[in-house]
Image (cartoon, rainbow, N blue to C red):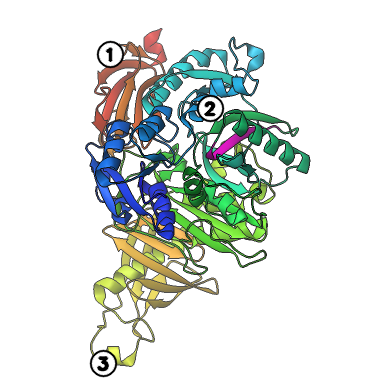
Amino acid sequence: MIQTVLVANRGEIACRVFGTCRELGIATVAVYSDADAGALHVREADAAVRLPGAAPAETYLRGELIVKAALAAGADAVHPGYGFLSENAEFARAVADAGLVWIGPPPSAIEAMASKTRAKELMGLAPLTDVAESDLPVLVKAAAGGGGRGMRIVRTLDALPGELEAARSEAASAFGDGEVFVEPYIERGRHVEVQVLADAHGTVWALGTRDCSLQRRHQKVIEESPAPGLAPELVASLHDAAVSAARAVGYRGAGTVEFLVSEDGRAHFLEMNTRLQVEHPVTEAVFGIDLVALQILVAQGEPLPPAPPVAHGHAVEARLYAEDPATGWTPQAGVLHELSFPARPPVNVEGGTPHAPGGAPWVRVDTGYTGGDTIGVHYDPMLAKVIAWAPTREAAVRRLAYALRRARVHGPVTNRELLVRSLEHPDFVGGRLDTGFYERNLDELTGAAPGAEPAAVAAALADAAARTGRAPAGAPALAQRLGAWRNLASQAQTKTYGDHEVRYRPTRDGGYEVLDAPGVRVVAALPHRVVLEVDGVVRNFDVTAYGDTVHVDSPVGAHTLAARPRFTDPAERAEPGSLLAPMPGTVVRVGDGLAEGVRVTQGQPLVWLEAMKMEHKIVSPASGTLIALHAVPGRQVEVGALLAVVQEVQEDEES
């Protein structure tokens, strides 16, 4: 029997595995980089071992260090989580060779499916070799790894060589393997997958379907189970193909077989992920199981029941990221002051949490962060997974949207508003899903959030109440007698948040009057809560200030406001043609042949930055001459750092 488990991972998935281990009475060990020394997964483990360094290549990708850590801490088993070394056959062998239990599939199965090219050959498929115009569009993919790394859509033959090189570079950096291949790109396809679970006694479960079509940069954003609107015969064929793939490689443990379903209902095999998936909670929710507990059971050599439990209801998961969808999904870093969700129904439900058919909807939150933690630049920017289960899809989607809208997420910019709008979009509500959803709808989903003006009013009045200690109208008489507030002259005051200027003045009855805002009446104003009547409707606004940044939460949405610019915009002081780092990160590549004095063209890629597991391409803003190049591969840069300067050349100068 397994007594102590080391999780060879970090963040949310490490915390997730630790939760199940606690329920089973199994001790836990964390590993951590220097950047994660104070992380939640370290705080939750029974013991922790440091991996010196910060970058993944120095820490979480060092299999020999992790095996050494497991032995030093007295662990007898290793759970790989997902990402990092979870699909590395050599790491799995090293764990077993050290006398530890590997909570995952056999190394031979990992090898058979680790390369997408070899996996396709196993399924009787082959990648494209000579790409012709008639083959377009095509998808360039990394043969190893996943998560959208090393993946590019190519729509013109001219762009293919550059995208192949970029994909090789990104794949080599992420997985240590630069092999890429090309396959047809199916427009408006649906990403559908089947969760499998197999034991060492010949039993293989196919646990329903999941739809993961809503993706950005080929990484999933919203997932659900079961996949809506699939014909029963298609579901049956997907199950059969998934079970056949698992049996073909002698699979054991949890894995996922992924397909792309075209508009005409045909399924195309993509790959098999030989690990637990990020989206596994939606399967746990509908089947009422704990997949991590079952992984441990299988790793101990115990048999699964002959058939899986019956599925009930519907579950939807949304990935909350520290990123700005409106600016190319750029990752964000900084202090996460607060991360909390509505208290009813209960959140942070551990594992699968069985439920009765037709039971009340519930919400689960899997996260690796709590308030006060810092979001760094070295790892994936996912803050949490929020999962809702309900008897019907409609109820689950509504419950998830509500939980996200009412969450308090104070810190760097996140994709929270995008998630809510996605869940409420007519195409998603109607089950009309495909991988091009964000490509078509991003502008609509990232537009300015409504309600900014009353939020600014609430922020200004909360600030006024905090500064003056002024009593709101109807304040308790005892507090008035104790002198908790003082009367001020009713002169007009002004407070500006971005484009919103708020003018108000104190009133004789201890309240406030907002000027130049027809239809807005102040009901009450306290330092942390303001009640406004807007066009006849009374609403509560919770206000929390962190220096000059103010977070305003209300039932109609959340707003982050800046009382004044916290930092001077680097673009305002940089000379024309300057290329500035849009986020903190590491320079991973500079364009071939670039040097000061070289001519460049508008849109030409000049520098590639890597931040939070994503690679970002910085292009020339104009055609001209490169008069400065400060970017050096391997150098870490802060947001706003000067990377290069292009001196624009006008057309009449070139003629």
Q: Which residue is mark 3?
A: 481
Mark with earlier residue (3, 1):
3
Q: Is the residue 107 above or below the residue 490 in the image?
A: above
Identified at 62% across, 11% down, the residue is 132
Give how far across and how far down residue 524 sits, in percent: 40, 78
Q: Quadrant of residue 309?
A: bottom right
Mark with earlier residue (1, 2):
2
Q: Which residue is mark 2?
A: 113
- Residue 340, numbered label: none
- 310 on left or right of 597: right
Within 10 Å of the Cα at label 2, are there few (<14), some (14-19), or many (20+) other Cα atoms? many
Which residue type does callout 2 highlight? Met
Which circle, 3 or 1, is nearer the viewer?
A: 1
Which residue type does callout 3 highlight? Arg
Give how far across and how far down residue 291 sits, in percent: 52, 49
- Residue 595, numbered label: 1
Q: Nearer the viewer, residue 405 or 264?
A: 264
Which circle, 1 or 2, is nearer the viewer?
A: 2
Give how far across and how far down residue 593 sits, in percent: 32, 10
**Residue 252 in sight from this viewpoint:** yes
- 52 on left or right of 88: left
Queried whether the magenta region covers residue 256, the answer comes back as yes
- 464 on left or right of 20: left
- 394 on left or right of 117: right
Q: Nearer the viewer, residue 349 or 171?
A: 349
Within 10 Å of the Cα at label 3, are there few (<14), some (14-19), or many (20+) other Cα atoms? few
Q: Is the residue 425 above or below the residue 474 in the image?
A: above
- Labels 2 and 3 touching (C-beta < 8 A): no
| Distance between mark 3 and mark 1 Cα atoms | 74 Å
